[in-house]
Amino acid sequence: MTDISEAEAANELMRLARKIAKHNRLYHAEDAPEISDADYDALVRRNAELEAAFPQLIRADSPSRLVGHEVAASPLSKVAHEVRMMSLDNAFSDEEVEDFVARVRRFLALPADAEVAMTAEDKIDGLSCSLRYEQGRLVRAATRGDGQVGEDVTPNVATIPDIPQQLAGEVPEVFEIRGEVYMAKSDFLALNAAQEEKGDKVFANPRNAAAGSLRQKDASVTASRPLRFLAHGWGAASAVPEQTQFAMMRRIAAWGLPVSPLLDRCTATADLLAHYQAIQARRADLPYDIDGVVYKVDRLDWQDRLGFVAKAPRWGMAHKFPAERAETTLEAIDIQVGRTGKLTPVGRLKPVTVGGVVVSNVTLHNRDEIARLGVRIGDRVVLQRAGDVIPQVVENLTRDAPAKPYAFPDHCPECGSEAVAEEGEVDVRCTGGLVCPAQRTERLKHFVSRAALDIEGLGEKTIDEFFALGWLESPADIFRLRRRRSEILTREGWKDKSVDNLLTAIEAKRAPDAARLLFGLGIRHVGAVTARDLLKRFAMLPALRETAQLARTGDAEALAELTSIDGIGPAVVEALGDFFHEPHNIAVWEDLLSEVSPPPYVVETKDSRVAGKTVVFTGALETMSRDEAKAQAERLGARSAGSVSVKTDLVVAGPGAGSKLKKAQELGIEVIDEAAWAEIVRAAG
């Protein structure tokens, strides 16, 4: 922290607050995390370090003050918690656990030799839930939400067999039992297998499956999912009949709620750490996913004295596990060919369990990564899986053993075309284009995807099925499927209604958005935003094709017209020229245009304070991609430019903004941050 100024710390704290808020929303509200638990924990730790060094800079929206995520738009009712549902501070080393125990001693002014008993139990990776019992009967269940307001899931919780509707024995008048709703590993695998067989969404991990299943508007969906519950504490209570955490958890078990079988009471720090090691050793064999061990001061009167900090109790700590690793054998290396022709090496492994998931395949990324790891068929490798991320090979244990090096293919395994890497790129690509069967199916899937033509009902499995039957070989064939209605009806799973729905969805795209159609063709370097930029200039696809063909011949006027478009550089011009030069691509193009008639491209804009102005985005954007920001500017009637000049009206500067920001300041151009830009977008409606 000695190398960072106060201004730099303030900027970093702002970025961390936004980034952590984003990942909290994805994890807690949308059940769709984008980063691993370990990466998230690293962001939180960095925020804590900066706040410790610069306490005067702690923000009102600091992650250290917030729990979970605010309950946004949801079909479920909101519920205010009578007693706030807190989170726990984390420890990542034995030394931090020792510091935690020492802080408890200091706060309570205990002598050095005084016994500080604590409970230790496995930290289950599920969805936090509070169960309110009145007169022993379950009256309400709620998710944690932001700790103060959650979602009412009472009808859904009533379908979970682990949760009794009536507690056994003598119970206080009001007692809220808190714990985790989870899905066992075996149940998760069975659910995903069933989902895949039906062609429905599969879940990334048991935690997402549990969260998605519990937060259903229709409780019958929840009832069809194998959810379970494990209690770990309590909230509002008219009385607490025990004097210690350990005794209280036994009492909750006696009332009929399951508690962790690994819960133990430890009287010394060494015992806590030993129990942590014992649980970690059993982690892979447990029936549910865990990500650490939770310690709590056992005496409840001490818990009351210790109290809380902003979002966590002083009397509790979560000791997180490091990223999980496992050792296995690399049995083969297969090559997969993607939509753009990229050859991706996939390692086939002797199956091994990592982080509660059986792993048999792992991406090796590209030929440079294979060279870096020095992997060969038969090598012993180490896999790592942190949180929800895809496992990766982190070490080759036998790289020094004599063996034949892996030879990356120089021809496509699907069509036999030459496979090469463009200058300055590490990815090797098939040059077969639309004649390559692997690219053809992947390009068809891309063509109907949400960002392209968005044809509902024509999913990946259907495309694979119809392609194998010879019904789909090019995009134009999609619009000829109506001729095969009777044949489709003979296929398993197809009924009159489903076939008619599909054909109706296809017919609705006979006059597609021209930019979506261009993007759907999968031309190298032509993304969704680039396609819109091109169509804004040319309006009609035939005009774009003609200009691209002329540019490939070296026509100076055509080259100038293309490169004058903001964001269109030599790579895009070359890709367009190459696409429209290939006879097979031209045949596919003309065949497609015989089936569809895209109208002239017109940009629909909203009234806004930036309408008619030129906007430049510079630096890192944290809540959206650069393409998304440009698309927003377009919808607001603004022009997005790539460089700052006297014609620039507004600069949106993120972290790392350099020369463009400096030039804007020199020219006296208005500069705002990403949050201010988001407010402009919101104000436009």
Image: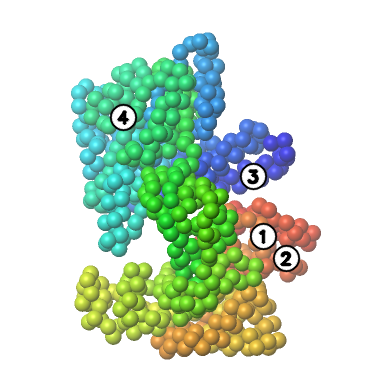
Density class for disc 4 (Cα within 10 Å; few <14, some 14-19, many ≥20) is: few
Alpha-carbon span between mark 2 and mark 3: 25 Å
Q: Is residue 670 left or right of residue 153?
A: right
Which residue is label 4 attached to?
A: 261
- Name the residue located 55 percent from the left edge and 24 percent from the top edge: 99
Residue type, mark 3 in image = Glu
> Quarter-wise, where is residue 139 in the image?
top left
Which residue is label 2 attached to?
A: 644
Vertical order, 78 against 642 (above or below): above
Q: Earlier in the sequence, mark 4 or mark 1?
A: 4
Quadrant in which the N terminus appears: top right
Density class for disc 3 (Cα within 10 Å; few <14, some 14-19, many ≥20) is: some
Residue type, mark 2 in image = Val
Residue type, mark 1 in image = Thr
Which residue is label 3 attached to?
A: 12
State which mark lies toward you, 4 or 1.
4
Alpha-carbon span between mark 4 and mark 3: 42 Å
Which residue is label 1 attached to?
A: 618
Q: Is residue 129 visible?
A: no
Alpha-carbon span between mark 3 and mark 1: 17 Å
Q: Is residue 467 left or right of residue 408?
A: left
Density class for disc 1 (Cα within 10 Å; few <14, some 14-19, many ≥20) is: many
> Does the CB distance between marks 1 and 2 fall below 8 Å?
yes
Q: Which of the two residues, 244 or 467, is positioned nearer the viewer here?
A: 467
Alpha-carbon span between mark 1 and mark 2: 10 Å
SS label for mark 2: loop
- Name the residue located 69 percent from the left edge and 56 percent from the top edge: 657
State which mark lies toward you, 4 or 3.
4
Alpha-carbon span between mark 4 and mark 2: 63 Å
Alpha-carbon span between mark 4 and mark 1: 54 Å
